[in-house]
Structure formats: structure tokens, C-alpha cells
Image (tube, rainbow, N blue to C red):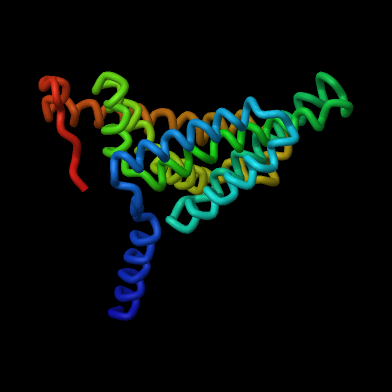
């Protein structure tokens, strides 16, 4: 019995250490540079010509490796990319046939290249530093909302993973093999997306209540959480 309890405790500790997140950028000026870098890379993913996309992909690859080294989950990005690619290619096949399938793939690749910098920013920079930097150029309440959104990004991935696993254990037809059939896509929406939306609304309400109890917005020069 003691051996089982010891194994269970070690498993919980390893799981906590795996999901724990350590931000490496805690300086406001360095955080501002990271925000500018993310904005530039995300904008370039949409606006640069096709011949320059490999260079953007190279930069994003470096950010992806660093984010994975810091504990970021790459599986969510992969699932998002594959799902969006399948849906977009299916729509292009229905509307235009197989002639413009390369345009569908290029559009999905551009969207992925635009998402990776924001994902990297949410992993490397602490949310309170992001809020502090954003408060330099926008009202404090807006900066708080945007920083809270960045802080929720890692939580969203965990919620999606837990909800998906629980629904699969219930017998929902949302496995990768089942999702190859379009008739099961609706089941993915009300088994995973709807509970995720409810959970996000609940979290946002809790964060708003916590800010209200701390009298956020009363002072003209609010302080930020120290490192």
C-alpha cells in the first residue's frame, strides 16, 4: 500500500512539474521587444509574398523549439493545424474542385505562422509584464483584459485536452478516426467546444470578481504584480 501511495505521489509531483510554467522574460523592456517581435512576425505571415514565407517559417520554427523547451504544448497547435487544414481543403474541393487546393494549404499555413508568435509570447513572458507593457500605450483596464487573455491561453489548452479525454471515455465519436466522417463534427462541437466556452465564461467571471474585490480601476496609477 505504501509503495502504491509513493508511486501516486511521485506521479502527481511529476504531473505538476510538467504543467508548471516558468516565464523567462520578466523585464518590461525586454517584454516590449518580445511583443513587437510577435506582432511583426504575425503581420508578416499574412502580408509578405509567398517567396519570403520560408524565412518567416524559419523564425517561427526557432520560436516553436524554444516554446517547447520551456514547457509549451505543441500538440494543440498540431491538432489545430490538421483540423483547419482538413476543413479548408474540404471546402475548397466542394467549391472549386482540386484546382485551387494549393491555395487552401497556403492559407492554412499562413494562419499557423501567425498563431505561433502569440503562442510563444504567452509562454515566455509573464502575464503581469505583458499587462504592464500594454498599459504604456492603452488604458489600464484594456491592458488588464488583454493580459488576462494571454494568461488564459495555456489554460485553454489544458481544458481542451481534459474535456476531450473525458468525452472520449464517455464514448463520444470524436476520435481522429471518427472525425474523418463529417457527420461527427457536430458531436465535437457540443462535446468539446460548448463545455470549453462555458468554462471560459466561468473563468472570466472569476477573474472579473477578483479584480473587483481588489478595487481594480480605482487608482489612477495601478501597480503590477512583482516577480
For the point 56% across and 43% down, which residue is it? Answer: 77
Relative depth, front residue between 71 and 36: 36
Residue 161 point in image, percent of width and height: 48, 46
Q: Is residue 85 above or below residue 75?
A: above
Q: Is residue 71 left or right of residue 3?
A: right
Locate residue 48: give its quadrant. Answer: top right
For the point 52% across and 48% down, which residue is it? Answer: 63
Q: Is residue 86 left or right of residue 200?
A: right
Q: Is residue 137 left or right of residue 114?
A: left
Residue 13 point in image, percent of width and height: 32, 65
Relative depth, front residue between 199 and 1: 199
Residue 198 point in image, percent of width and height: 39, 29
Locate residue 56: give its quadrant. Answer: top right
Q: Is residue 82 above or below residue 75?
A: above
For the point 49% across and 31% down, which residue is it? Answer: 39
Q: Quadrant of the N terminus?
A: bottom left
For the point 28% across and 26% down, which residue is it? Answer: 136
Residue 47 point in image, percent of width and height: 64, 25
Relative depth, front residue between 198 and 142: 142
Amino acid at each position: 500500500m505504501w509503495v502504491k501511495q509513493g508511486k501516486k505521489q511521485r506521479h502527481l509531483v511529476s504531473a505538476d512539474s510538467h504543467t508548471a510554467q516558468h516565464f523567462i522574460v520578466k523585464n518590461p523592456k525586454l517584454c516590449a521587444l518580445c511583443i513587437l517581435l510577435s506582432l511583426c512576425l504575425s503581420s508578416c505571415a499574412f502580408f509578405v509574398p509567398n517567396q519570403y514565407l520560408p524565412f518567416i517559417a524559419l523564425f517561427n520554427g526557432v520560436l516553436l523549439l524554444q516554446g517547447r523547451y520551456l514547457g509549451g504544448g505543441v500538440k494543440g497547435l498540431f491538432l489545430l493545424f490538421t483540423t483547419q487544414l482538413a476543413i479548408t481543403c474540404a471546402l475548397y474541393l466542394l467549391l472549386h474542385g482540386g484546382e485551387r487546393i494549393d491555395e487552401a494549404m497556403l492559407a492554412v499555413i499562413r494562419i499557423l505562422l501567425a498563431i505561433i508568435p502569440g503562442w510563444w509570447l504567452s509562454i515566455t513572458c509573464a502575464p503581469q509584464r505583458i499587462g504592464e507593457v500594454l498599459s504604456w500605450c492603452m488604458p489600464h483596464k484594456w491592458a488588464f483584459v488583454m493580459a488576462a487573455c494571454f494568461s488564459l491561453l495555456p489554460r485553454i489548452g489544458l481544458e481542451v485536452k481534459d474535456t476531450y479525454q473525458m468525452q472520449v471515455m464517455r464514448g463520444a465519436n470524436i476520435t481522429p478516426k471518427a472525425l474523418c466522417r463529417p457527420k461527427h463534427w457536430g458531436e465535437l462541437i457540443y462535446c468539446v467546444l460548448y463545455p470549453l466556452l462555458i468554462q471560459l465564461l466561468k473563468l472570466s467571471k472569476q477573474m472579473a470578481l477578483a479584480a473587483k474585490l481588489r478595487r481594480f480601476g480605482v487608482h489612477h496609477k495601478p501597480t503590477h504584480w512583482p516577480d
